[in-house]
Image (spheres, rainbow, N blue to C red):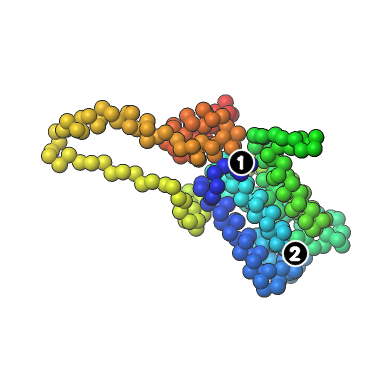
Amino acid sequence: MNGGPSGFNNAPVTRIIVIASALFTVVFGIQGRSRNLPWSYQDIFKKLQIWKLIVTVFGFSSTPELVFGIYLLYYFRVFERQIGSNKYTVFILFSVITSLLLEVLAQWLLKDPSLNILTSGPYGLIFASFVPFFFDIPVSTRFRVFRFNFSDKTFIYLAGLQLFLSSWRRSMLPGICGILAGSLYRLNVFRVRRVKFPEVIASFFSRLSWPSTGTTSPTRSSRNVLGSAPTYASRRAEANAPALLSTLLEPPEESIGTLVSMGFDRNSARQALIHARNDINAATNILLESQGH
C-alpha cells in the first residue's frame, strides 16, 4: 500500500510539511539541542517560548520518530490528493491547533509529573490522519501469516503504533489528542469541513513547492496564413477533432491508479477524469459529489 503514485504530485502541502519536519529535526539534532525539543505548557504560557511551539510542531525528538513520522506523513499525502490542497491545509491547521489545545488542557488537568514534558513532532496531524484512514481508505489486499489475518493497511497501523509508543506516555498523550482532533474534524464541528482559504492564500503553498513533473504545456493552435478560407487540411483536421480530443483526454494510468487507491471504482475514476480533463483534484470532487447523492 503506497497511497497512490510515488512522489509529491498533487501534494505540495505535504511536501512542505515533510521537508520542514526533516529540517527542524536534523538542525536541532546536529546542534545537540534535540533534548530541548520536548515541551510543556509552562514553556509557552509562562516562559513565552513561542519559538519552541513552532519547532515542536515540526521537529521530532529522535531519529526513529523521524523515520516513522516521515513515512506516515508521506503516505497520508493521499488525503491531500483526495480533498485538494486547499481543504487539506484547513485539515492540517485544525488538527495541529486542536491537538495542541487538548494537550495543554490534559497537562493542566492531570498534573501528572510524568506528563509535564511531552515529545515533539507533528503528532496531531499524523494521528488525526488515522481517522479518515480508518474510515475512508478501503483494504485492497488481504493475506495470512501464521494463521493471523493481515491487510495492506496493517503496515500503516504498525508504523503508527511504533510512533505512538516511541516515548511511552509522553508520546501517547499527543497521539490520543491527535485522534480526538481528527474525530472532531470528521464530525464537522463548527462546519470546519466546509472552510476553504481564498485562492491567493491557498496558492502560496504551491509557489513554495517545486513544480510537479510530468505536466505538458498546451499546444498552440495553428493559423491559416493564406486567409480566412479553410484549407482541405484544416477541414480534415476539424472533422477528426472529436476523435483526437478523445485520445488526448484519455486519462493516464497513474491518475486512474491514484483515484483507485482512494477507494473509487476504476471505471468511475476514468469517467470522472475525462469529464475533469485529467484534473485529478476536479475528478476527485466529481466522485465525492456523486457518492453524496
Dot 1 amino acid type: Arg
Pointer 2 local density, CA inside 10 Å: few below 14, some 14–19, many at least 20: many
Residue 51 lies in quadrant: bottom right
Q: Is residue 250 left or right of residue 58?
A: left
Q: Is residue 194 left or right of residue 130?
A: left
Q: Is residue 263 left or right of residue 275?
A: right
Residue 287 lies in quadrant: top right
Image point 24% across, 32% down: which residue?
237
User: What residue would you read off at disc 2?
Assistant: 38
Label 1: element kind: helix
Image point 71% across, 37% down: which residue?
151
* Residue sitting farthest toward the bottom: 31
User: What residue would you read off at disc 1?
Assistant: 193
Residue 18 percent location from the top left of the image:
60, 56
Mark 2 or mark 1: name the one nearer the start of the chain. 2
Pointer 2 with pointer 1, Cβ within 8 A: no
Residue 222 percent location from the top left of the image:
23, 41
Image point 56% across, 29% down: which residue?
265
- Image quadrant in which the N terminus is located: top right
Q: What separation in Å lies between label 2 and label 1 (alpha carbons)?
A: 31 Å
Residue 71 percent location from the top left of the image:
65, 52
Residue 114 percent location from the top left of the image:
86, 61
Q: Is residue 52 left or right of residue 84?
A: right
Pointer 1 local density, CA inside 10 Å: few below 14, some 14–19, many at least 20: some
Along the line of sight, which residue is nearer the eye, 66 or 203?
66
Question: Which labelled disc corresponds to residue 57?
Answer: none
- Image quadrant in which the C terminus is located: top right
- Answer whether residue 49 is visible to the viewer in this image: no
- Mark nearest the camera among 2 and 1 is 2
